[in-house]
Amino acid sequence: MTSETPGWDAIDAALEQIYPGVEPRHLGTIIKWALGGPDPLDGISFYPRLDPVPHWHAVTYGMSELYGKQSDNPDESGWGFEFTFRVRRDPAETEPPIWAANFLQNLARYVFQTGNWFEPNHHMDLNGPIALDRETLIRAVVFTEDPELGAIDSPNGAVQFLQVVGITADEYAATQAWSVHAFLDLLAGRIPLLVTDLDRASLTDDPAVAETVDGGRRLDGSSTATLALAEFGWRPDGDLVRLVIGAHVAPRVAETLVGRLPFGRTLRLDGPESSVEFASDSFYIATEEGFENHLQIGLTGEALDGLLQVLVPTAGVRVAAGAGPIVVEIVRSEIRDPEGNVVRTIG
């Protein structure tokens, strides 16, 4: 008899290889997304683990096609992945963390609403603590293939198990200035199975780690070619060009420019309505025909230094010395919780 849930069954079969006979704590969705419900994931299974460190291993159901084949792509099932998330737990803990389930639903909601999917080495600044009811330094995430589950072929196409890894703001800055992949290698050498621990300190507090990151940045530069920024745009301002950047992201832009342009690489900043691509070159400003919202800027070494000087987390309008007609406006950033309440102002 043909199964009505071939995609779901394929996920269960992969988990059975790692957790034979183990019954997970499963949190199901009452009203499915397809029926107008608010949660894209049909369910999340939490497996309690004691080794190599006590943690919950969460696996989602809903980013891939769980039932019949619906997408036109025969090679991939749905979005082509399911999230996994490993969260440190007290060995005596028997109930999975609800905040982790809510967080995974929020990630899924972002993908379904925007059409932007995740792949290994992708990253996201959370603009605040990953768990709002906890004091934690974990304020960003990166993505990598789950080290145990990997990828599978389901009847509806391929599914990669994409592990969400929580990192601190300092660590996130290191991934931008250097490399997500390289920093994940550092992290994996110190944190078994890349378990997210809300109580841990930043690895960059370790002088050896900080030295490795700095050496890698100086040697390799940054692997980040594009920054998608909610607080970014540009507009003509008389004979000038005004770049408008949020105070929260200005230092990140500066750090990434340093890791790109001196190495002969470009950096693209994508805002909601316009974008700018920077290159190391003789100084120029141009728009591409047919793409009037996309600006191209070539920066000399002197112009880059001038731009870096004004990319600070303080509101104000400043001229970038040596960068000709470029004016930078830093605007205050409002950090909001999932309910839309302002919890912090920067700038």
Image (spheres, grey):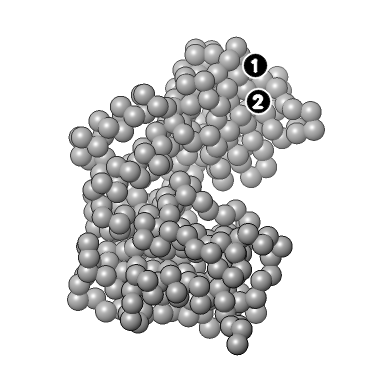
Within 10 Å of disc 1 (Cα), the crowding (few <14, some 14-19, many 20+) is some
Count of picture labels: 2
Above or below, 228 relative to 13: above
The answer to which of marks 2 and 1 sits earlier in the sequence is: 1
Specify the label residue 296 is tagged with.
2
Q: Residue furthest right?
A: 290
Above or below, 5 relative to 238: below
Within 10 Å of disc 2 (Cα), the crowding (few <14, some 14-19, many 20+) is some
What residue do we see at 20% from left, 35% from top? 207
Horizontal arrangement in the rendering, residue 54 relative to residue 12 (left or right) = left
What residue do we see at 32% from left, 64% from top? 87
Mark 2 in CB contact with mark 1 (< 8 angstroms) = yes
The residue nearer to you, when weighing 55 against 279, is: 55
Specify the label residue 284 is tagged with.
1
Above or below, 163 relative to 18: above
Horizontal arrangement in the rendering, residue 258 relative to residue 56 (left or right) = right
The residue nearer to you, when weighing 291 against 305, is: 291
Specify the label residue 56 is tagged with.
none
Picture coordinates of residue 188, whole percent (x, y)? 29, 49
Q: Residue furthest bottom?
A: 1
Disc 2 element: strand
- In the rendered structure, which amino acid carries the disc numbered 1? Tyr
Disc 1 element: strand
